[in-house]
Image (spheres, rainbow, N blue to C red):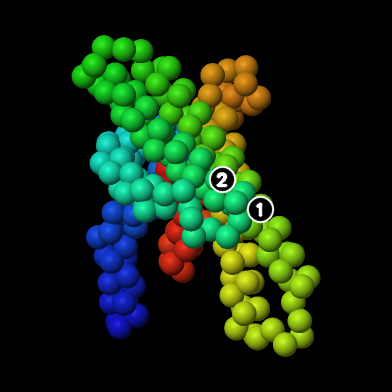
């Protein structure tokens, strides 16, 4: 009984926070797409259930798009706080982070225009704006991957220079940072595969993924995000 109450309290705590709720919705969205895509390939009964799950996934995706209408200021505040990354010791990491923040900042207004066009609020072609927002998302992911690889390279160099007198605590901190960066790379690679898929046909594997594969990549990324959030090392918002 006590364990159930603790679990319920933890779930409520996650759902009461914006980022926690977004992680849950994102995971359910891609999970439904994965299950729906798999079932849609089977018999008539499973196909109907798959169609319904894909419909749920679409609605959850729309939900996240609407909620992101309010993310611009939060992203702007973060970008202003980071500034030009004066606290970063490595210049490459600093400028990768600045460019990453810029790509994230530009992503939101492009998506908002695309959403408004689809909702007939403004008269313009939504397709080009969806493409532009996806391109900024993909660029952000690429920059994030390069940044994490650079940090891993620095950590590896530090390990080589370590002396036998290095503390166990220092070793644990470095191991935790390595794990965090590796998970971030895996998450970003999974998201990047989907970002390329959603670009106009003709670019790499754009338009080639079946629904279940999109769901699989998104589910992998989402579960990594949930884990990172649970240990206080969440990253990314898209």
- The residue drawn where x is 28% and y is 59% is 17
Residue 67 placement: quadrant:
top left
Nearer-the-camera pick, 155 or 63 = 155
Neighbor class of circle 2 (other Cα within 10 Å; few <14, some 14-19, many 20+) is many
**Is the C-beta separation of discs 2 and 1 under 8 Å?**
yes
The relative height of residue 124 versus residue 81 in the rendered view (above or below) is above
Q: Is residue 25 visible?
A: no
**Residue 79: x %, y % from top left:** 39, 47
Quarter of the N terminus within the rendering: bottom left
Among all residues in the image, which is located at the extreme front? 86
Instruction: Label 1: state its secondary structure.
Output: helix
Foreground pick, 153 / 41: 153
Q: Quadrant of residue 151?
A: bottom right
Give the x, y percent position of residue 85. 48, 53
Residue at numbered disc 2: 96
- Can residue 177 be seen here? yes
Q: Position of residue 137 (x, y in %)?
A: 48, 35
First in sequence, mark 2 or 1: give its number.
2
Q: Residue at x 68, y 65 (%)?
A: 155
Q: Residue at x 51, y 40 (%)?
A: 99
Can you give x and y, in whole percent of width and height, for residue 41 in the image?
55, 32
- Number of on-image labels: 2
Q: Which residue is mark 1?
A: 150
Question: As drawn, is 197 to the left or to the right of 131?
Answer: right
Give the position of the C terminus as an image quadrant: top left
Q: Is residue 24 left or right of residue 177?
A: left
Identify the residue at horizontal 28%, vertical 72% (top origin). 9
Q: Secondary structure at mark 2?
A: helix
Whole-number angstrom distance, CA of label 2 to CA of label 1: 10 Å
């Amino acid at each position: 009984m006590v364990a159930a109450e603790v679990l319920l309290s933890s779930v409520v705590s996650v759902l009461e926070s914006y980022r926690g709720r977004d992680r849950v919705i994102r995971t359910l969205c891609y999970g439904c797409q994965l299950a729906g895509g798999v079932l849609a390939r089977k018999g008539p009964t499973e196909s109907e259930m798959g169609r319904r799950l894909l419909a749920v996934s679409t609605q959850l995706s729309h939900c996240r798009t609407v909620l992101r209408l309010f993310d611009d200021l939060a992203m702007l505040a973060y970008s202003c706080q980071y500034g030009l990354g004066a606290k970063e010791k490595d210049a490459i990491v600093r400028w990768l982070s600045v460019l990453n923040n810029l790509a994230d900042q530009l992503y939101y207004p492009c998506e908002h225009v695309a959403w408004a066009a689809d909702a007939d609020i403004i008269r313009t072609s939504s397709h080009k704006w969806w493409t532009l927002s996806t391109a900024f998302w993909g660029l952000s992911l690429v920059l994030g991957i390069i940044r994490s690889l650079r940090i891993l390279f620095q950590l590896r160099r530090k390990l080589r220079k370590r002396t036998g007198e290095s503390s166990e605590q220092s070793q644990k901190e470095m191991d935790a940072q390595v794990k965090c960066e590796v998970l971030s790379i895996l998450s970003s690679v999974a998201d990047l595969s989907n970002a390329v898929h959603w670009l106009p046909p003709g670019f790499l594997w754009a338009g080639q993924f079946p629904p279940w594969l999109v769901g699989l990549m998104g589910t992998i990324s989402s579960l990594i995000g949930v884990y990172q959030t649970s240990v206080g090392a969440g990253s990314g918002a898209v």
